[in-house]
Image (spheres, helix red, strand yellow):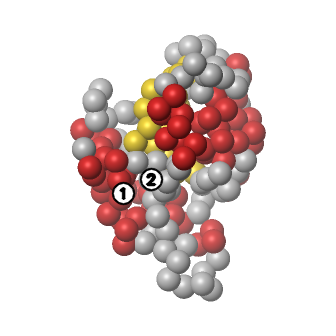
Amino acid sequence: MKTLFLLRHMKSSWDDDSVPDHERPLSARGERALATMADYFRHRKGGTPRPDLILCSTAVRTRATLAGLLTLWREPPPLCVDRVFYMASAPALADRLRALPDPTATVLLIGHNPGLEELALSLAGAEEDPALRTRIMEKYPTGGLARLDFTLDRWADLAAGKGHLSEFATPRGVARD
């Protein structure tokens, strides 16, 4: 069994147009959304997930998102912060996941759209909950979190349609609940 959490970074600041995309920090709204999603992780049904590995883009906004979540665990999970995840396409992300060591059961990937949205939709099985798929297709907002479960022994076997989309949470949706 493999579990993949796909978390889009929180809302970034556009206050200064001269700041390169890679260097944009979180906005005040992003900071509030981060607190909301950290609280969601802490109190979600099934408890706080503990990834065996966290993969994260090197962008400032993804690293700030990661930093806000690291307080969830007494001892932080192993991390891989790599530029390869910055604005990566769904196929590039899938290739990176297929290369993971097989003992790694649960992965949290913090990245960007459109890659995360496309990856979630491509990996989810066609028979998945249509309401969850529709919500993702309508908008995978900043701070959006999808969970996919796979009945795989090896990450190398990760393929389109092999996942079970079991969760999709957003800061706005969590704040309303």
- Report which residue position mark 1 lands on: 34
Q: Position of residue 1 (x, y in %)?
A: 52, 16
The numbered disc on residue 24 is: none
Going 58% across and 43% down the picture, which residue do you hit? 137
Q: CA distance from mark 1 to mark 2?
A: 7 Å
**In the image, residue 13 above or below residue 107:** below
Q: Secondary structure at mark 1?
A: helix
Whether residue 147 can be seen here: no
Q: Which residue is nearer to you in this view: 90 or 103?
A: 90
Amino acid type of disc 2? Gly
Going 62% across and 22% down the picture, which residue do you hit? 126
- 142 left or right of 86 in image: left
Amino acid type of disc 1? Leu
**Rendered-image quadrant of the C terminus:** top left
Q: Position of residue 65 (x, y in %)?
A: 44, 57
Cβ atoms under marks 1 and 2 closer than 8 Å: yes
The image quarter containing residue 44 is: top left
Whether residue 62 can be seen here: yes
- 143 left or right of 34 in image: right
Q: Which residue is nearer to you in this view: 103 or 145?
A: 145
- Report which residue position mark 2 lands on: 143
- 149 left or right of 175 in image: right
Q: Position of residue 32 (x, y in %)?
A: 32, 63
Q: Position of residue 64 (x, y in %)?
A: 45, 62
Going 32% across and 41% down the picture, which residue do you hit? 41
Circle nearer the viewer, 1 or 2: 2
Quick one: label 2, few (<14), some, or many (20+) residues within 10 Å? many
Q: Secondary structure at mark 2?
A: loop
**In the image, residue 86 above or below residue 159:** below
